[in-house]
Image (cartoon, rainbow, N blue to C red):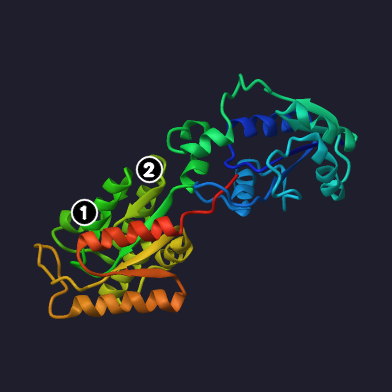
Amino acid sequence: MRRGLVFGKFMPLHRGHQLLIERALAAMDDVTVVVYDSLPAGDYASMPVDLRARWITDLYPEVAVVPLDDPLRDAMDSTDPAHAGTYASGVEFLGHFDCVFTSEPAYERFAKLLKAEHVVLDAARELVPISGTRIREDLYAHRAWLEPRVYASLVQKVALVGTESTGKTTLARALAERHDTLWAHEYGRELWIEQGGGAAFADYLKIARMQHRREEQMRLHSRRFLFCDTTPWTTLHWSLRGYGTADPRLRDLADRTMSEYTWFVCDDDFPWIQDGWREMGDGEAHRFQRQQVDDLDARGVPYLVLSGTIEQRLERVAGHLQRRSPDKVR
């Protein structure tokens, strides 16, 4: 059985990396992909090593994906032949490889230390004229070099939740304009108006699924962030409010997607205003707000409460997103 090795940081996984993996799969009986972790450096979208490993596993389930700490995390140039011995010793436990697939001739010594043939592909970057460095400089501009699911996973969904009349829609629109990106408006409201102000029990699962499907499609065309006026979790709470229960499939969707968002709760310090479709007067809006906040607390979900004017909320969200700027990568 002939074994092949592909290795790298895959920050992010792009068409050039995929060329290596696919050529290895075509030539070898067994392929291992080593994904090196690294120190943060630079203002780029978060790419933790487990996410990078998952990209490869999802796209190429037939390969063995092995995440490893980078043995020279501070090295500016991992292609330097002086580092070959360190990297070679770090993968010895994986066993013998017949071929090492790279796009860098400088990895020749590394392959020799592994007693493997060095297969160099597209060293001149003619087949895939792109690099991870260029992509990281502007993910949005270079997204055509990425698998759609890879690019979408690098767009952070930001959830704006809260009771009626708390400025969620206005804030989502303003944030999208400020960050030159998209915002996902509330499908449930569309359906509510279309049906004349009502929702059957079965509608809530439909609403949550459609909302999530829209978000995932919009992620493909968003820049860094997608601001969401609602979430499947919000729809779950509307079902609980209206019927005292929820479809188990809706509960499952809400539970599975909680970690997809950065959460902001819009405080109910605005006066409640009837826009023709709202139904939570006489203090019910505040009770619904409390129900949602209590659930976030019970789930241990981190969130930030937004109070004050729309402009104050806008500045607080923007500042918070900048301070927790995703992990920086080299």
Secondary structure of the residue carrying numbered label 2: loop
Closest to the observer, 120 or 75: 75
x, y percent for residue 282: 13, 80
x, y percent for residue 84: 82, 39
Please state which amino acid type lies under the numbered disc 2.
Answer: Ser
Q: Residue at 42% across / 41% down in the picture? A: 220
Q: Residue at 20% across / 68% down in the picture? A: 164
Residue 267, picture quadrant:
bottom left
Instruction: Please tell me the numbered disc located at residue 222.
Output: 2
x, y percent for residue 291: 31, 78
Q: Can you say which quadrant of the picture contains the N terminus?
A: top right
Left/right placement of residue 278 relative to residue 100 reads left
Closest to the observer, 314 or 115: 314
Left/right placement of residue 323 relative to residue 35 reads left
x, y percent for residue 118: 81, 28
14 relative to 326, above or below: above
Left/right placement of residue 249 relative to residue 15 reads left
Secondary structure of the residue carrying numbered label 1: helix
313 relative to 21, above or below: below
Q: Can you say which quadrant of the picture contains the C terminus?
A: top right
Left/right placement of residue 172 relative to residue 165 reads right
Residue assigned mark 1: 190
Could you tell me if residue 15 is visible in this image? yes
Please state which amino acid type lies under the numbered disc 1.
Answer: Glu
Q: Residue at 40% across / 74% down in the picture? A: 296
Could you tell me if residue 146 is visible in this image? no
Per the model, the C-alpha gap separating discs 2 and 1 is 22 Å
Front position among marks 2 and 1 = 2
